[in-house]
Amino acid sequence: MIRTGIGYDSHRFAPPGPLVLGGVTIESDVRLAGHSDGDAVAHAVTDAILGAAALGDIGRLFPDTDPANENRDSIGMLRVAVARVHAAGWRVQQIDVVVVTEYPRLQPHRDAMRACLAEALEVRPEDVSLKGKSNEGMGWIGRGEGLACLATATLVRAE
Ligand code: MG
Protein backbone atom coordinates (compact mmCIF):
# COMPACT_ATOMS: atom_id res chain seq x y z
CA MET A 1 0.00 0.00 0.00
CA ILE A 2 1.41 3.33 -1.10
CA ARG A 3 -0.09 6.80 -0.68
CA THR A 4 1.07 10.12 -2.10
CA GLY A 5 0.38 13.62 -0.83
CA ILE A 6 1.04 17.16 -1.96
CA GLY A 7 1.76 20.28 0.07
CA TYR A 8 2.12 23.95 -0.81
CA ASP A 9 3.13 26.99 1.20
CA SER A 10 4.25 30.55 0.63
CA HIS A 11 5.54 33.25 2.95
CA ARG A 12 6.42 36.91 2.54
CA PHE A 13 9.94 38.22 3.23
CA ALA A 14 10.16 40.83 6.03
CA PRO A 15 12.99 42.29 8.09
CA PRO A 16 14.75 41.39 10.30
CA GLY A 17 16.66 38.17 9.60
CA PRO A 18 17.74 35.50 9.97
CA LEU A 19 15.70 33.28 7.69
CA VAL A 20 14.71 29.72 8.64
CA LEU A 21 14.18 27.29 5.78
CA GLY A 22 14.09 23.50 5.90
CA GLY A 23 15.02 23.76 9.57
CA VAL A 24 18.26 25.57 8.72
CA THR A 25 18.96 29.11 9.92
CA ILE A 26 20.35 31.23 7.08
CA GLU A 27 22.06 34.55 7.70
CA SER A 28 19.91 37.17 6.00
CA ASP A 29 18.46 40.70 6.35
CA VAL A 30 14.95 39.26 6.02
CA ARG A 31 13.02 36.38 7.49
CA LEU A 32 9.91 34.58 6.31
CA ALA A 33 7.03 36.39 8.00
CA GLY A 34 4.44 34.21 9.67
CA HIS A 35 2.81 33.20 12.90
CA SER A 36 5.43 30.47 13.41
CA ASP A 37 9.06 30.74 12.26
CA GLY A 38 7.73 30.95 8.67
CA ASP A 39 9.59 27.86 7.47
CA ALA A 40 7.68 27.31 4.21
CA VAL A 41 9.65 24.14 3.38
CA ALA A 42 8.76 22.49 6.69
CA HIS A 43 5.13 23.62 6.29
CA ALA A 44 4.78 22.26 2.74
CA VAL A 45 6.38 18.94 3.76
CA THR A 46 4.08 18.72 6.79
CA ASP A 47 1.04 19.23 4.54
CA ALA A 48 2.34 16.65 2.05
CA ILE A 49 2.64 13.89 4.66
CA LEU A 50 -0.64 14.82 6.35
CA GLY A 51 -2.31 14.88 2.93
CA ALA A 52 -0.96 11.46 1.99
CA ALA A 53 -2.43 10.00 5.19
CA ALA A 54 -5.66 12.04 4.77
CA LEU A 55 -5.10 13.55 8.22
CA GLY A 56 -6.03 17.14 7.38
CA ASP A 57 -3.50 19.95 7.21
CA ILE A 58 -1.06 21.96 9.27
CA GLY A 59 -3.61 24.72 9.90
CA ARG A 60 -5.98 22.23 11.53
CA LEU A 61 -3.19 20.65 13.61
CA PHE A 62 -1.69 23.99 14.69
CA PRO A 63 -4.30 26.80 14.44
CA ASP A 64 -2.73 30.27 14.19
CA THR A 65 -5.40 31.47 16.62
CA ASP A 66 -3.59 29.45 19.33
CA PRO A 67 -0.92 31.61 21.05
CA ALA A 68 1.07 28.41 21.76
CA ASN A 69 1.83 28.24 18.02
CA GLU A 70 3.37 31.72 17.87
CA ASN A 71 7.04 31.63 16.78
CA ARG A 72 6.79 27.86 16.98
CA ASP A 73 9.64 25.76 15.62
CA SER A 74 8.28 24.31 12.37
CA ILE A 75 10.52 21.23 12.45
CA GLY A 76 8.91 20.49 15.83
CA MET A 77 5.49 20.77 14.15
CA LEU A 78 6.69 18.41 11.41
CA ARG A 79 7.72 15.90 14.09
CA VAL A 80 4.21 16.04 15.59
CA ALA A 81 2.74 15.40 12.12
CA VAL A 82 5.12 12.46 11.60
CA ALA A 83 3.93 10.99 14.91
CA ARG A 84 0.30 11.33 13.71
CA VAL A 85 1.19 9.61 10.45
CA HIS A 86 2.90 6.77 12.35
CA ALA A 87 -0.11 6.42 14.68
CA ALA A 88 -2.33 6.04 11.60
CA GLY A 89 -0.22 3.07 10.47
CA TRP A 90 1.97 4.75 7.85
CA ARG A 91 5.63 5.60 7.52
CA VAL A 92 7.28 8.12 5.24
CA GLN A 93 9.21 6.64 2.34
CA GLN A 94 10.46 9.73 0.53
CA ILE A 95 9.72 13.38 -0.15
CA ASP A 96 10.46 15.72 -3.03
CA VAL A 97 10.52 19.49 -2.54
CA VAL A 98 10.70 22.43 -4.93
CA VAL A 99 11.42 25.90 -3.55
CA VAL A 100 10.45 28.60 -6.01
CA THR A 101 12.39 31.74 -5.19
CA GLU A 102 14.97 34.23 -6.38
CA TYR A 103 16.56 34.37 -2.92
CA PRO A 104 18.34 32.86 -1.02
CA ARG A 105 20.44 30.45 -3.05
CA LEU A 106 19.59 26.98 -1.74
CA GLN A 107 22.61 25.09 -2.94
CA PRO A 108 24.93 26.02 -0.04
CA HIS A 109 22.25 24.92 2.46
CA ARG A 110 20.72 21.98 0.60
CA ASP A 111 22.50 19.14 2.38
CA ALA A 112 21.89 20.64 5.83
CA MET A 113 18.17 21.00 4.99
CA ARG A 114 17.96 17.43 3.69
CA ALA A 115 19.61 16.13 6.87
CA CYS A 116 17.32 18.15 9.12
CA LEU A 117 14.13 17.15 7.28
CA ALA A 118 15.25 13.49 7.12
CA GLU A 119 15.84 13.41 10.87
CA ALA A 120 12.32 14.76 11.54
CA LEU A 121 10.74 12.43 8.96
CA GLU A 122 12.71 9.40 10.23
CA VAL A 123 14.07 8.66 6.77
CA ARG A 124 17.57 8.79 5.29
CA PRO A 125 18.88 12.07 3.82
CA GLU A 126 18.97 10.36 0.42
CA ASP A 127 15.19 9.93 0.73
CA VAL A 128 14.80 13.71 0.81
CA SER A 129 15.05 15.59 -2.50
CA LEU A 130 15.21 19.37 -2.44
CA LYS A 131 15.45 21.61 -5.49
CA GLY A 132 15.56 25.37 -5.97
CA LYS A 133 13.92 27.09 -8.96
CA SER A 134 13.97 30.76 -9.84
CA ASN A 135 10.72 32.27 -11.13
CA GLU A 136 12.64 33.95 -13.99
CA GLY A 137 11.93 37.37 -12.48
CA MET A 138 8.15 37.04 -12.96
CA GLY A 139 5.42 38.12 -10.55
CA TRP A 140 5.64 38.44 -6.76
CA ILE A 141 8.33 35.78 -6.49
CA GLY A 142 10.32 37.47 -9.24
CA ARG A 143 10.09 40.80 -7.40
CA GLY A 144 11.52 39.11 -4.31
CA GLU A 145 8.41 39.65 -2.17
CA GLY A 146 8.51 36.12 -0.81
CA LEU A 147 8.96 32.49 -1.73
CA ALA A 148 6.77 29.49 -2.47
CA CYS A 149 7.35 25.84 -1.82
CA LEU A 150 5.81 22.64 -3.21
CA ALA A 151 6.33 19.20 -1.71
CA THR A 152 5.20 15.67 -2.44
CA ALA A 153 5.41 12.77 -0.01
CA THR A 154 5.14 9.03 -0.45
CA LEU A 155 3.94 6.95 2.50
CA VAL A 156 3.99 3.19 2.82
CA ARG A 157 1.98 1.01 5.16
CA ALA A 158 4.03 0.31 8.29
CA GLU A 159 4.93 -3.36 8.84
MG1 MG B 1 3.37 28.42 6.32
Image (cartoon, grey):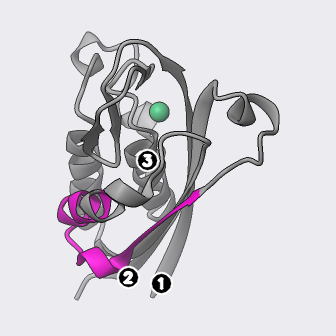
- The residue under label 2 is 156
Camera-side residue of 41 and 157: 41
Element at badge 1?
Answer: strand
Task: Give the magenta-colored segment's residue range.
Answer: 113-132
- The residue under label 3 is 41
Do callouts 1 and 2 mark residues in contact (Cβ within 8 Å)? yes
Camera-side residue of 146 and 42: 146
Amino acid bearing label 3: Val
- The residue under label 1 is 2
* Between discs 1 and 2, the one toward the N terminus: 1
Q: Residue at x 29, y 48 (%)?
A: 78
Name the spot of residue 4 as percent of width and height, x first.
53, 72
User: What is the CA distance from the residue labelled 3 to the residue labelled 1?
Assistant: 23 Å
Name the quarter where the N terminus is drawn: bottom left
Element at badge 2?
Answer: strand
Do callouts 2 and 3 mark residues in contact (Cβ within 8 Å)? no
Amino acid bearing label 2: Val
Name the spot of residue 84 as percent of width and height, x first.
27, 55
Camera-side residue of 139 and 76: 139
